[in-house]
Amino acid sequence: MGVIFLLILFYILNQFIFNFYKKKHSFFERKKMDLLYLYHLLFFGIFLWYSFNNPADSKRYYEDMEYFEGTWLELLGTDTLFINFVSYPFYRLGFSYSMLMLTFAWFGYLGFVYAYVFMSEKIPVKVKVFKRLDLLTLILFFPNMHFWTSALGKDSLIFMGLMMFTYAIINPKSRIFLLILSSLVVFYIRPHVFMFVAVGVVIGYLSGKEKIPFWKKATISLGMVLVLTLVMDDVLNVMGLGESENIVEDFQSESGERSKSLSTSGSGVDMSNYPLPFKFFTFWFRPLFIDAPNILGIITSFENLIYLLLFFKILKKDFIKFLRRSPSLIKMSFVIFILSSFALTFVMSNLGIIMRQKSMVMYFIFFVIYYYLAQKKYRRYLKYKAYKLRQKKEAAVRGQISPT
């Protein structure tokens, strides 16, 4: 009964959110978002069944609440502690395990709403891929993304935080509350990812093609550098480098140890001797059928194949030129994607964890691909329009000099 109550409550809350963004953005499609909510709930049901029949971190998070005897503020901390901090008030309200799972699934769903809004706001051009599929719809309905963001844990919250942050940074002055809230969520769950985001913002604003006043660029850059300075100790502690005197060597050693421990499980893959390009390939596109560890891996293999096909679309000579002349949000997204991928490839050596971890960064490269294809389509449209206008003028000139 509690789950049914929450399903209805979250649906009603969705409608208020939809009304708000429909007034702000004329492109907002309520029906698509309602369908996306139902689709996400399907994966919540699958994950809930999976967690009851397999070991799952979500059960450990709930058990932490059962045995915790301190005060709520004692739970405020980074990494796992923050999940307990968010969960605790709901647990005290009497939420069951299933109800708390659904609550975090809703947080994950909000991430998809913000992904939809920020992509649609920045890219008004519809793009078709594989001849008839709408690219934005395809991106929003990737099953692996929904599976890992539909449960009690870090993935749903950080995905919401990252997508909310990207929407807020488009217009930080009018979306300052969302910007601060999302920054705190990302930092408290994964401080190192917040570091990548901050670096991406600085590089994006400093190198973007928009004519932003120097003082504004300097203010934003100095602000992010100051924040990074303040949180650097937390970032290093989470990465196990708090007492390090040589960060580069110790990072290589620490990541090697983590990679070795993760590669010993059933879905482990020894990436320690892979060259960097193949590490990236493994993180972005594996499993691919032949190395799928289970039925989930087989399903994910189909999705990874689509990722690979989409990636091929930017393997063009003009992509570097596009990237060099792209706006700040594109450069920010690309930097976040590359930096996160670079760091995680040195740690991840387990296909199951890879499938989960990459869900928080893949939307950044999807956005870059979408923008690139939309820009090419728009330029083709402008050329076609100029061609038709030229034909019309030539026809008018021929009519003027005609004997009739």
Image (cartoon, rainbow, N blue to C red):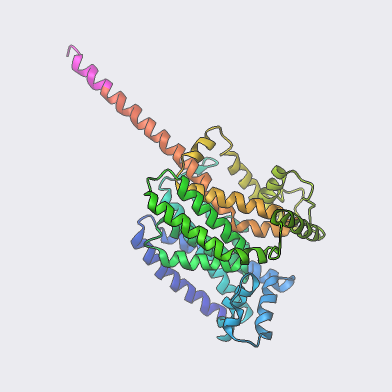
Q: Tell me which segment is drawn in magenta.
A: 394-404
Q: Residue lying farthest bottom?
A: 69
The mark tally for this picture is: 0
Magenta region includes residue 403? yes
For residue 159, which quarter of the picture? Answer: bottom right
Q: Position of residue 87 (x, y in %)?
A: 59, 78
Q: Position of residue 35 (x, y in %)?
A: 49, 61
Q: Is residue 67 left or right of residue 38?
A: right
Q: Is residue 257 left or right of residue 9?
A: right
For residue 72, which quarter of the picture? Answer: bottom right
Q: Residue at x 41, y 60 (%)?
A: 172
Q: Position of residue 328 (x, y in %)?
A: 46, 48
Depth check, front residue: 345 or 129: 345
Q: Residue at x 38, y 52 (%)?
A: 215
> Is most of the magenta stretch helix, strand or loop?
helix
Q: Position of residue 324 (x, y in %)?
A: 50, 39
Depth check, front residue: 150 or 183: 183
Q: Quadrant of the C terminus?
A: top left
Q: Is residue 150 visible?
A: no
Q: Quadrant of the N terminus?
A: bottom right
* In the depicted structure, whether residue 303 falls above or below residue 177: above
Q: Is residue 227 left or right of residue 379?
A: right
For residue 352, which quarter of the picture? Answer: bottom right
Q: Residue lying farthest top?
A: 403
Magenta region includes residue 123? no
Q: Is residue 206 visible?
A: yes
